Each structure stands twice: as C-alpha cells, then as structure tokens.
Image: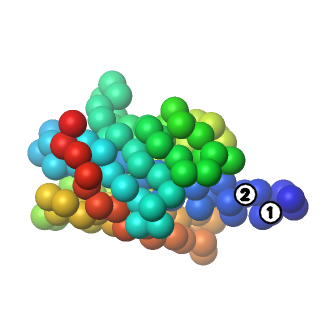
Amino acid sequence: MKPFLKSIFAFSFAAAVLTFAAAPAAADITSGIWLRDDGAAKVRMQRCGEALCAINVWIKTPGDEKVGDRLVLQVEPRGPGRLEGAAFDPQRNLRFSSRITYSDTTMTTSGCILGGLLCRSVNWTKVSSR
C-alpha cells in the first residue's frame, strides 16, 4: 500500500475510534460500550488518567484495527452534548483535531488532519453502560 494511502487508512481508523478527555459529566454519558455504525467494531469508553480512552474490545475483521488498540482524546465541553479538542492515536503516532456530539444513546465522532483538509465522521450507538 502506498504511504499516503496508509496514512489515510490510519486516520480513518483513528477517527472511527475517537475517545475523549472531558468534564466528568461528559465522561458519565460517554462511558460504556459503543458500536460503530458499520457494525465492524465495538469500543469501551473509559477514563485513563486525566483523559478518557476508547479501547477496541471487538473487531469484526482484524487488520490495521486490533482488539486492545486505544485512542486518547483531550477535549473540553463546547455546549450541551458537544466536546472539542485533539486526539492522539499511540499505535500510529497520529494526532488530529476532533469533535464529539452525543446524547444518552448516540454519538458522532469527527476528526480532521492536515489543518482540516481531510475529515471523517463516524456514528455510534451505545450498547452497554458498563
């Protein structure tokens, strides 16, 4: 695979697994297991130090995404049901901007690289609060 395509794929994975370091109220709402809209991944949202992490707990077809991969995001509340900040994917040493909108049972994560030139959004459904 060409290096540019690998970078795009890595970014797509990272955007798909977004997690957040935010105010405790956001952590309470976003904590739990979430199913990605394509049905190919489940992540556990939980605190990890001062941040929150999304940790892959199930991957339909392992490849670049693996169970145990995590994504860490430093974000702050930007209004009701909205968080914004920056994400870090330690598996790929990739940093990007991020935005999360959420309710009790749904969430949309968005991430951008290259100064906002390349962005991707993913929808999630909460499947468990634990």
Q: Is residue 127 visible?
A: yes
- Disc 1, SS: helix
* Residue 1 horizontal/vertical position (percent): 86, 59
Q: Residues within 10 Å of mark 1 (few under 14, many from 20)?
A: few
Which of 38/92 is in front? 38
Amino acid type of the residue that numbered disc 1 sits on in the rendered structure: Phe
* Residue 5 vertical placement versus 57 (above, below): below
Is 13 situated left or right of 107 in this image? right
Q: Residues within 10 Å of mark 2 (few under 14, many from 20)?
A: some
Residue positioned 26% across, 52% down in the render: 127
Amino acid type of the residue that numbered disc 2 sits on in the rendered structure: Ser
Q: Quadrant of the C terminus?
A: top left
* Residue 40 horizontal/vertical position (percent): 50, 57
Determine the image quadrant of residue 107.
bottom left
Residue positioned 53% across, 65% down in the render: 112
Which of 64/127 is in front? 127
* Residue 49 horizontal/vertical position (percent): 33, 25
Q: Are marks 2 and 1 in contact (CB under 8 Å)?
A: yes
Q: Which residue is mark 2?
A: 7
* Residue 10 horizontal/vertical position (percent): 66, 54
Is 48 situated left or right of 14 in this image? left
Residue positioned 47% across, 66% down in the render: 38
Q: Which residue is mark 1?
A: 4
- Disc 2, SS: helix
